[in-house]
Image (spheres, rainbow, N blue to C red):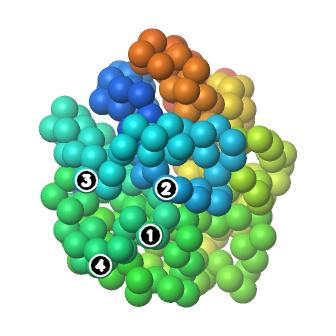
Amino acid sequence: MTRLTTTFAAPRPALVCFITAGDGDTAANLDALVEAGADVIELGMPFTDPMADGPAIQAANLRSLGAGTTTADVLRYATDFRARHPDVPLVLMGYANPMVRRGPEWFAEAAAAAGVDGVICVDIPPEEDDALGPALRTKGIAPIRLATPTTDAARLPQVLEGSEGFLYYVSVAGITGKQQAQIASIEENVARIKQSTAIPVAVGFGVRTPEQAAAIARVADGVVVGSALVEICGEYGAEAPAKLRELTSALAHAVHTARQEQLA
Protein backbone atom coordinates (compact mmCIF):
# COMPACT_ATOMS: atom_id res chain seq x y z
CA MET A 1 0.00 0.00 0.00
CA THR A 2 1.09 3.56 -0.64
CA ARG A 3 1.07 6.30 1.98
CA LEU A 4 -2.06 7.75 0.34
CA THR A 5 -3.99 4.46 0.26
CA THR A 6 -3.02 3.73 3.87
CA THR A 7 -4.20 7.16 4.99
CA PHE A 8 -7.55 6.97 3.21
CA ALA A 9 -8.10 3.39 4.43
CA ALA A 10 -8.35 4.69 8.01
CA PRO A 11 -11.85 4.44 9.53
CA ARG A 12 -12.28 8.22 9.55
CA PRO A 13 -12.19 11.02 6.97
CA ALA A 14 -8.81 12.61 6.19
CA LEU A 15 -7.84 16.26 6.63
CA VAL A 16 -5.79 17.53 3.67
CA CYS A 17 -3.95 20.80 4.33
CA PHE A 18 -2.47 23.11 1.69
CA ILE A 19 0.19 25.80 1.96
CA THR A 20 2.40 27.42 -0.68
CA ALA A 21 6.08 26.44 -0.71
CA GLY A 22 8.44 29.32 0.02
CA ASP A 23 5.79 31.49 1.68
CA GLY A 24 7.29 32.07 5.12
CA ASP A 25 9.14 29.39 7.08
CA THR A 26 7.91 26.45 5.02
CA ALA A 27 9.49 23.71 7.14
CA ALA A 28 8.12 25.12 10.40
CA ASN A 29 4.69 25.67 8.83
CA LEU A 30 4.57 22.10 7.48
CA ASP A 31 5.61 20.67 10.83
CA ALA A 32 2.86 22.67 12.54
CA LEU A 33 0.23 21.21 10.20
CA VAL A 34 1.38 17.63 10.84
CA GLU A 35 1.72 18.10 14.60
CA ALA A 36 -1.81 19.50 14.75
CA GLY A 37 -3.35 16.53 12.95
CA ALA A 38 -3.18 17.04 9.18
CA ASP A 39 -3.38 13.63 7.48
CA VAL A 40 -2.17 14.68 4.01
CA ILE A 41 -0.07 17.68 3.02
CA GLU A 42 -0.52 19.55 -0.25
CA LEU A 43 2.45 21.76 -1.03
CA GLY A 44 1.82 24.41 -3.65
CA MET A 45 4.47 25.07 -6.29
CA PRO A 46 4.50 28.85 -6.83
CA PHE A 47 3.65 29.97 -10.34
CA THR A 48 3.36 33.37 -11.99
CA ASP A 49 -0.22 32.85 -13.24
CA PRO A 50 -2.16 30.66 -10.78
CA MET A 51 -5.44 30.88 -12.68
CA ALA A 52 -7.47 28.49 -10.50
CA ASP A 53 -6.60 30.25 -7.28
CA GLY A 54 -8.23 33.10 -5.44
CA PRO A 55 -6.61 36.21 -3.97
CA ALA A 56 -5.10 34.52 -0.89
CA ILE A 57 -3.18 31.86 -2.82
CA GLN A 58 -2.31 34.26 -5.64
CA ALA A 59 -0.77 36.56 -3.02
CA ALA A 60 1.13 33.62 -1.50
CA ASN A 61 2.50 32.76 -4.95
CA LEU A 62 3.73 36.33 -5.38
CA ARG A 63 5.33 36.37 -1.91
CA SER A 64 7.06 33.06 -2.59
CA LEU A 65 8.31 34.03 -6.05
CA GLY A 66 9.39 37.40 -4.67
CA ALA A 67 11.53 35.52 -2.15
CA GLY A 68 13.17 33.69 -5.06
CA THR A 69 11.57 30.26 -4.61
CA THR A 70 12.40 27.84 -7.44
CA THR A 71 11.28 24.32 -8.38
CA ALA A 72 14.55 23.07 -6.87
CA ASP A 73 13.59 24.74 -3.58
CA VAL A 74 10.16 23.09 -3.62
CA LEU A 75 11.77 19.68 -4.15
CA ARG A 76 14.19 20.40 -1.30
CA TYR A 77 11.28 21.26 1.01
CA ALA A 78 9.70 17.94 -0.03
CA THR A 79 12.90 15.97 0.57
CA ASP A 80 13.38 17.49 4.00
CA PHE A 81 9.71 16.95 4.88
CA ARG A 82 9.95 13.29 3.95
CA ALA A 83 12.98 12.84 6.21
CA ARG A 84 11.08 14.38 9.14
CA HIS A 85 7.72 12.74 8.42
CA PRO A 86 8.26 9.33 6.80
CA ASP A 87 4.59 8.30 6.91
CA VAL A 88 2.64 11.46 6.02
CA PRO A 89 1.52 11.65 2.37
CA LEU A 90 2.85 14.64 0.47
CA VAL A 91 1.21 15.96 -2.68
CA LEU A 92 2.63 18.68 -4.93
CA MET A 93 0.01 20.96 -6.44
CA GLY A 94 0.69 23.38 -9.23
CA TYR A 95 0.64 24.19 -12.91
CA ALA A 96 2.12 22.46 -15.93
CA ASN A 97 4.93 24.83 -16.83
CA PRO A 98 7.28 24.14 -13.88
CA MET A 99 6.43 20.43 -14.05
CA VAL A 100 7.11 19.77 -17.73
CA ARG A 101 9.58 22.48 -18.68
CA ARG A 102 12.56 20.10 -18.38
CA GLY A 103 10.49 17.13 -19.49
CA PRO A 104 7.92 15.11 -17.53
CA GLU A 105 10.42 12.31 -16.88
CA TRP A 106 12.82 14.72 -15.17
CA PHE A 107 10.08 16.08 -12.92
CA ALA A 108 8.68 12.64 -12.07
CA GLU A 109 12.11 11.32 -11.18
CA ALA A 110 12.94 14.37 -9.05
CA ALA A 111 9.58 14.24 -7.27
CA ALA A 112 9.95 10.52 -6.57
CA ALA A 113 13.46 11.06 -5.19
CA ALA A 114 12.01 13.75 -2.90
CA GLY A 115 9.43 11.33 -1.50
CA VAL A 116 6.39 12.88 -3.18
CA ASP A 117 3.27 10.68 -3.21
CA GLY A 118 0.98 12.51 -5.61
CA VAL A 119 0.79 15.43 -8.03
CA ILE A 120 -2.15 17.69 -8.84
CA CYS A 121 -1.55 19.58 -12.06
CA VAL A 122 -4.34 22.09 -12.41
CA ASP A 123 -4.00 22.89 -16.10
CA ILE A 124 -3.34 19.51 -17.71
CA PRO A 125 -6.79 18.07 -18.52
CA PRO A 126 -7.41 14.30 -18.69
CA GLU A 127 -7.35 14.49 -22.49
CA GLU A 128 -3.69 15.53 -22.28
CA ASP A 129 -2.67 12.91 -19.72
CA ASP A 130 0.32 11.91 -21.86
CA ALA A 131 1.95 15.24 -21.01
CA LEU A 132 2.71 14.09 -17.45
CA GLY A 133 0.62 11.12 -16.27
CA PRO A 134 2.67 8.20 -17.65
CA ALA A 135 5.93 9.64 -16.28
CA LEU A 136 4.37 10.00 -12.81
CA ARG A 137 2.86 6.50 -12.78
CA THR A 138 6.17 4.96 -13.86
CA LYS A 139 7.74 6.44 -10.71
CA GLY A 140 4.88 5.37 -8.44
CA ILE A 141 3.46 8.88 -8.05
CA ALA A 142 -0.32 9.27 -8.10
CA PRO A 143 -1.72 11.68 -10.71
CA ILE A 144 -4.58 13.27 -8.74
CA ARG A 145 -7.40 14.65 -10.86
CA LEU A 146 -9.96 17.36 -10.27
CA ALA A 147 -13.72 17.01 -10.70
CA THR A 148 -16.24 19.85 -10.40
CA PRO A 149 -20.02 20.28 -10.18
CA THR A 150 -19.97 20.61 -13.97
CA THR A 151 -18.20 17.24 -14.49
CA ASP A 152 -21.18 15.40 -15.96
CA ALA A 153 -21.79 11.68 -16.49
CA ALA A 154 -20.30 11.85 -19.99
CA ARG A 155 -17.03 13.39 -18.82
CA LEU A 156 -16.59 11.67 -15.46
CA PRO A 157 -15.15 8.38 -16.83
CA GLN A 158 -12.41 10.33 -18.61
CA VAL A 159 -11.54 12.18 -15.39
CA LEU A 160 -11.47 8.93 -13.42
CA GLU A 161 -9.40 6.97 -15.93
CA GLY A 162 -5.80 7.08 -14.75
CA SER A 163 -6.70 8.86 -11.51
CA GLU A 164 -4.88 7.57 -8.45
CA GLY A 165 -4.52 8.47 -4.78
CA PHE A 166 -7.74 10.40 -4.39
CA LEU A 167 -10.08 12.47 -6.52
CA TYR A 168 -10.14 16.14 -5.60
CA TYR A 169 -13.75 17.31 -5.89
CA VAL A 170 -13.86 21.07 -6.32
CA SER A 171 -17.08 21.90 -4.53
CA VAL A 172 -17.75 25.14 -6.40
CA ALA A 173 -16.95 26.02 -9.97
CA GLY A 174 -14.58 28.97 -9.79
CA ILE A 175 -11.56 30.04 -7.79
CA THR A 176 -10.38 28.88 -4.38
CA GLY A 177 -11.20 30.45 -1.09
CA LYS A 178 -14.34 32.48 -1.49
CA GLN A 179 -17.52 30.48 -1.98
CA GLN A 180 -18.93 27.61 0.01
CA ALA A 181 -21.17 25.17 -1.78
CA GLN A 182 -24.30 23.82 -0.22
CA ILE A 183 -23.74 20.53 1.61
CA ALA A 184 -26.67 18.91 -0.18
CA SER A 185 -25.03 19.57 -3.54
CA ILE A 186 -21.70 18.22 -2.29
CA GLU A 187 -23.30 15.08 -0.88
CA GLU A 188 -25.19 14.44 -4.12
CA ASN A 189 -22.11 14.87 -6.30
CA VAL A 190 -19.78 12.83 -4.08
CA ALA A 191 -22.32 9.99 -4.07
CA ARG A 192 -22.57 10.21 -7.86
CA ILE A 193 -18.79 10.05 -8.27
CA LYS A 194 -18.42 7.15 -5.83
CA GLN A 195 -20.87 5.08 -7.86
CA SER A 196 -18.23 5.09 -10.61
CA THR A 197 -14.98 4.62 -8.68
CA ALA A 198 -13.35 3.12 -5.63
CA ILE A 199 -10.93 6.05 -5.38
CA PRO A 200 -11.46 8.18 -2.25
CA VAL A 201 -13.07 11.57 -2.84
CA ALA A 202 -11.71 14.62 -1.01
CA VAL A 203 -13.67 17.87 -1.17
CA GLY A 204 -12.15 21.33 -1.17
CA PHE A 205 -12.44 24.95 -2.34
CA GLY A 206 -14.21 27.22 0.11
CA VAL A 207 -13.67 25.28 3.36
CA ARG A 208 -12.64 27.73 6.08
CA THR A 209 -14.07 26.66 9.45
CA PRO A 210 -14.21 23.49 11.56
CA GLU A 211 -18.00 23.54 11.19
CA GLN A 212 -17.81 23.54 7.40
CA ALA A 213 -15.12 20.86 7.50
CA ALA A 214 -17.21 18.61 9.74
CA ALA A 215 -20.26 18.93 7.51
CA ILE A 216 -18.23 17.86 4.47
CA ALA A 217 -16.43 15.08 6.37
CA ARG A 218 -19.81 13.43 7.00
CA VAL A 219 -20.30 12.89 3.26
CA ALA A 220 -16.75 12.66 1.81
CA ASP A 221 -13.55 10.68 2.36
CA GLY A 222 -11.47 13.79 2.94
CA VAL A 223 -11.66 17.56 3.38
CA VAL A 224 -9.16 19.94 1.76
CA VAL A 225 -8.38 23.28 3.43
CA GLY A 226 -6.10 25.79 1.73
CA SER A 227 -6.92 29.49 1.60
CA ALA A 228 -7.64 29.81 5.33
CA LEU A 229 -4.19 28.35 6.13
CA VAL A 230 -2.43 30.37 3.44
CA GLU A 231 -3.94 33.57 4.84
CA ILE A 232 -2.38 32.75 8.22
CA CYS A 233 1.04 32.32 6.57
CA GLY A 234 0.67 35.73 4.94
CA GLU A 235 -0.69 37.56 7.97
CA TYR A 236 1.49 36.18 10.75
CA GLY A 237 4.86 35.51 9.11
CA ALA A 238 7.25 34.09 11.69
CA GLU A 239 4.36 33.61 14.13
CA ALA A 240 2.40 31.54 11.60
CA PRO A 241 3.26 28.05 12.95
CA ALA A 242 1.45 28.63 16.25
CA LYS A 243 -1.62 30.01 14.48
CA LEU A 244 -1.56 27.19 11.91
CA ARG A 245 -1.38 24.67 14.74
CA GLU A 246 -4.41 26.26 16.39
CA LEU A 247 -6.66 26.22 13.32
CA THR A 248 -5.46 22.83 12.05
CA SER A 249 -6.05 21.22 15.44
CA ALA A 250 -9.66 22.46 15.41
CA LEU A 251 -10.13 21.34 11.80
CA ALA A 252 -8.61 17.91 12.49
CA HIS A 253 -10.85 17.33 15.49
CA ALA A 254 -13.91 18.36 13.47
CA VAL A 255 -13.03 16.13 10.51
CA HIS A 256 -11.91 13.10 12.51
CA THR A 257 -14.98 13.07 14.79
CA ALA A 258 -17.63 14.14 12.25
CA ARG A 259 -18.97 10.64 11.68
CA GLN A 260 -18.90 9.73 15.36
CA GLU A 261 -21.22 12.67 16.00
CA GLN A 262 -23.36 11.49 13.11
CA LEU A 263 -23.73 8.06 14.73
CA ALA A 264 -24.38 9.44 18.20
Mark 4 or 1, nearer chain start: 1
Residues marked 2 and 4 touching at CB (< 8 Å): no
Residues marked 3 and 2 touching at CB (< 8 Å): no
**Which of disc 4 and disc 2 is earlier in sequence?**
2
Residue tagged 1: 97
Residue 158 is left or right of residue 129, and the answer is right
Identify the residue under disc 4.
103
Q: Residue at x 27, y 68 (%)?
A: 107
235 or 137: nearer the viewer = 235
Q: Distance of mark 3 from mark 4, alpha carbons?
A: 15 Å
- Please tell me the numbered disc located at residue 72: 3
Q: Do the CB atoms of the residues marked 2 and 1 lie less than 8 Å apart?
A: yes
What x and y, as percent, mark residue 96? 46, 70
Answer with mark 3 or mark 1, whichever residue precedes in sequence: 3
Element type at mark 2: loop
Callout 4, which amino acid?
A: Gly
Amino acid type at mark 3: Ala
> What residue sits 40% from the left and 37% below the top?
67
